[in-house]
Amino acid sequence: MNVMVVMPQMGESVAEGTVVTWLKNVGEVVAKDEPLVAISTDKVDVEIPSPAAGVLAEIVVQEGQTVPVGAVLAYIGEAPPTEAAASPGISKAEQSVGVTQAGPVVSPTAPRPQTWHSPAVLELAKEYGVDLTRVKGTGSEGRVTRKDLLDFASRRSIVAAVPADKRAAAFERADRDQILPISHLRKAIAEHMVRSKQTAPHVTQIHEVDVTVIARYRQANKEAFFQRTGIHLTFLPFVVKATVDALRAHPLMNASYTQDGIVIKKALNIGVAVALEDGLIVPVLREADKKSFLTLAKESADLAARSREKRLRPEEVQQGTFTVNNLGAFGALIGTPIIVQPQVGILGFGRVVKRPVVIDDAITIRSMAYLCLSYDHRLIDGAYAGAFLNHMQSNLEQFDFAILP
Amino acid sequence: MEITYLEAIRQALWEEMDRDERVFMLGEDIGVYGGAFKITKGFLDKFGPERVIDTPLSESAIVGAAIGAALMGMRPVVEMQFADFIACAFDQIVNMAAKHHYRIGEPVPMVIRAPYGGGIHAGPYHSQCPEAWFFHVAGLKLVAPSTPRDAKGLLKAAIRDPDPVIYFEHKYLYRHMKGEVPEGDNVVPIGKAEVKRKGSTMSVIAYGAMVEQSLAAAEKLVPEGIDLEVVDLRTLQPLDMETILTSVKKTGRALVVHEAPKTGGIGGEIAARLAEEAFRFLDAPVVRVAAPHIPVPFSPALEEMYLPNADKIALKARELANF
């Protein structure tokens, strides 16, 4: 009996998808969960695994066609018997010449095998563990280009998460439990978080900072600041500014740990985590060290607003070199943030609260907050992280208000 | 303020002569006549005949005198009327200026300005790009700016450098190329390339007049989804391999562009070093766009056929992108 392959739901707001590439030809044997077809939605490109083992009996939706979620894409028929015999899915032409040998059936229209690969493709295939015979080439004479390989690897990394999800879903599922589809954004976050934790040994170091002078300044000037600039004066630009100064003095914190060596990033691009209804996103303040306080305040407000409206351009979430996370926005005093790969540090800034503090043996009320720095211990050690945080701390405690407009 | 490439060179010379009295100039017709391209017009009145010296028509003597002056603590700036004539001074440059520091231990701080390049319908004796002749010789620094900012900053760096520097200034860019030049004493370091345009499809490595053509090619290819990264070498010797490798490792493809003939050109050295140092990052052969192995033609039509330009660069870039 034939099994239907349908266009899956790829995210809550996705209504349709486009078939990009059939990875199997009609008549080819396919294993259960083996990638069968690459589809593209407005959010993501994904390879769909085969729902059953068998033979690809019929392709209903051709490459390039767009169909709604739930539409039938193809039928999987039963696997061919191992004796020499005709089986469903094998063309009449093949039957007439007589298919005599057992084993996998290869359609005559299968892409011709690649005879050579560029050094870059070989190197990357090794790095990503990609079987090059499965990658469709778009280069000259059907050659697999570096881009083909990287596209393939990135699609696969999304698909790779599926079996684990399925297992989790199947586990102890009671009748009244509800199963929600996993949005593309959720999947991307899940995949990135797992990868970051597997890649970098995280250490979180926490310093306490006295932000009384900033809190007082803000209280006294926020109305006037808003009148002048149209921007609400929050703690964020102060933290970003202090982060930038500390990064400039501690370049290892603005770096990547790679196979080729430690890459010290020339640009200071600060990612600022923004919470969304269904996840979070990290837009990037580019070249933050070259921007004024006001520009940082304006841009971070603009990026946050457009993040929530889903109006960011793709390049606006790329090439961050360090990340700042405003933990306090949701009430947290302390957090242990996960590094955005391939960066090596992320700074969480906790909620500012008034607390009794001992200064010169007297108890006094101060506005206090915690700076929580998670760093990649492959590259950064505690002493360096401490120096970084001390730098930030003294910067925030003696903030130079002359830089404000 | 926008100024021409020629004006940038003039300003650098003026400011350096004003700043350091050891700096002086010598060359053919640079004083009374103001130079073949009028770059040194007005210098004689301001700095006097001891610092702006009209010489006999003997490039060998001019460079020889400059080497002597440099050894005595001066900072000579030689003008070759056309870079093509530099061949007459070859022995002085290659065997004296380049090797003296190595042999004797005394630096030779001097600059040879070499107005080079075609596109001005001036035929085979007034259009050549002779940089590769000197690229082979250890002991020389070679720079070839593409913009007014770099022209000014690199000439200042060359004059302050302790080694002999040949400064290749492109004649086609003189009055045609305009650009912003920062106020004040802005020195562009020797040995540093600059990414003039960021891109992802391939790295285009160029210098001199070919930077502008490469950037124009990049714009032509935008509608086709081909995104060129343009690396301006600025300094030819020593080559900034770090910047070149960083770019090529990112894109996996390299197109090297120069106006000089392809055979024995600097592009061949760059291609070889990419093969040696970045082989595993390459996704396609390194391709060169350069002039054919013939003298620069007189005929404007033939010269146009001879010179690389934005269309020819775009054509090769398209082929390379589709490889």
Image (cartoon, helix red, strand yellow):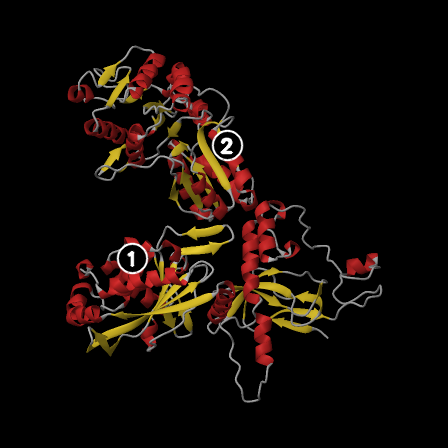
The chain holding disc 2 is: B
Q: List the residue tagged with mark 1.
A: A245
Q: Nearer the viewer, residue B305 or B40?
A: B40
Type of amino acid at the residue the image marks with label 1? Asp
Question: Where in the figure is residue A361, as x and y percent of width and height?
Answer: 20, 75
Q: Nearer the viewer, residue B273 or A353?
A: A353
Question: Where in the figure is residue B218, as x and y percent of width and height?
Answer: 42, 42
Q: Can residue B312 be spotted in the picture?
A: no
| Residue drawn where x is 52% and y is 53% of the image | A259
Q: List the residue tagged with mark 2.
A: B269
Quadrant for the C terminus of chain A in the image: bottom left
Question: Where in the figure is residue A312, as x and y percent of width and height?
Answer: 37, 62
Type of amino acid at the residue the image marks with label 2? Glu
| Residue drawn where x is 47% and y is 60% of the image | A378
Tag 1 and tag 2 share a subunit: no
Q: Residues within 10 Å of mark 1 (few under 14, many from 20)?
A: some
Q: Can residue A73 be spotted in the picture?
A: yes
SS of the residue under disc 2: helix
Callout 1 touching callout 2 (CB < 8 Å)? no
The chain holding disc 1 is: A
Quadrant for the N terminus of chain A in the image: bottom right
Residue B67: name its quadrant.
top left
Q: Nearer the viewer, residue A390 or A103?
A: A390
SS of the residue under disc 1: helix
Give above or below for B155 relative to A43.
Answer: above
| Total numbered badges shown on the rendered structure | 2
For residue A119, side relative to residue A43 (left or right): right
Q: Residues within 10 Å of mark 2 (few under 14, many from 20)?
A: some
| Residue drawn where x is 38% and y is 25% of the image | B117
